[in-house]
Amino acid sequence: MRLTCVIPAYNEEARIGAVLQAVLGHPLIDEVVVVDDGSGDGTSAVVGGYPQARLITLAQNGGKTAALARGFAETRSEVILLIDADLVGLSPAHLTALITPVLQGRAAMSISLRDNAPGLWRWIGLDYISGERALRRDLLAGQEKALQRLPKFGFEVFLNALILKAHAPLAVVRLPGVKSPLKSAKYGFWTGIWGDILMLRDLMRAVPPLGLIGQVVQMRRLRV
């Protein structure tokens, strides 16, 4: 099966190079597509230094969901790997661990559990909004219009709903040593806090609060 890695990026000039070094040349990855979501820094310039990656630059920032939707439209691979552009400590071995359950047919989707995931998520063994996932493309079949209606940061919980509807097996893959910087560390304390509030708002616009709790409970039951 052909596998494409889609990386949405917004103002990740300082971090995306390390992510690309882990992803590019990986033996299980056939194609890497980076969608620069209207960055105001040098993100596109950094990606341009890696000619093996295909760069798509959006004219304005539309949010993570819009960037991912554009990336999906650019590939027809049977398996899609989603990797956030700001990860620290990512290695090819981590990618192999995330990809393998889907390529082997043991799971329809795998989802990461990073070292710095919230303590509650590590305790229950599931980070339901993790951005690092491998999935069968057919989970997204016919969802193009639904993606267009999602808020900027509603994609992960929307994807959760799809796998729950399909009642498909889910693999949770721990990624030791991998961390995702807090928004407050990237953008400053108050800007980061506001960003978290907006993200939480979008999650609840995509799925009501009780629905989010229900997702966690049901996804844990699907784990293989």
Image: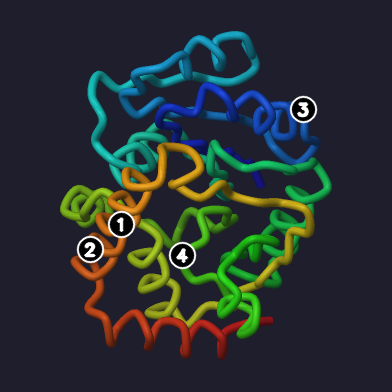
Q: Residue at x 59, y 65 (%)?
A: 117
Q: CA distance from mark 1 to mark 2?
A: 5 Å
Q: Residue at x 28, y 51 (%)?
A: 194
Q: Quadrant of the C terminus?
A: bottom right
Q: Earlier in the sequence, mark 3 or mark 2?
A: 3
Q: CA distance from mark 4 to mark 3?
A: 27 Å
Give yes or no for contact between labels 4 and 3 (Cβ–Cβ under 8 Å).
no
Give yes or no for contact between labels 1 and 2 (Cβ–Cβ under 8 Å).
yes
Give, as a three-letter code, the residue at label 4: Ile
| Left-right relation of 201 to 10 | left
Q: Quadrant of residue 51?
A: top right
Residue position marked by numbered label 2 in the rendering: 201
Residue position marked by numbered label 4 in the rendering: 129
Q: CA distance from mark 3 to mark 2?
A: 37 Å
Tell me the mark number nearer the camera, choosing from 4 and 1. Answer: 1
In the foreground, 121 or 164: 121
Give, as a three-letter code, the residue at label 2: Arg
Give, as a three-letter code, the residue at label 1: Met
Give yes or no for contact between labels 3 and 1 (Cβ–Cβ under 8 Å).
no
Residue position marked by numbered label 3 in the rendering: 25
In the foreground, 48 or 41: 41
| Left-right relation of 185 to 100 | left
Q: Tag 1, which secondary structure?
A: helix
- The image shows residue 220, relative to residue 46, as above or below, that is below
Q: CA distance from mark 3 to mark 1?
A: 33 Å
Q: Earlier in the sequence, mark 4 or mark 1?
A: 4
Tally of numbered discs: 4
Q: What numbered label is drawn on residue 199?
A: 1
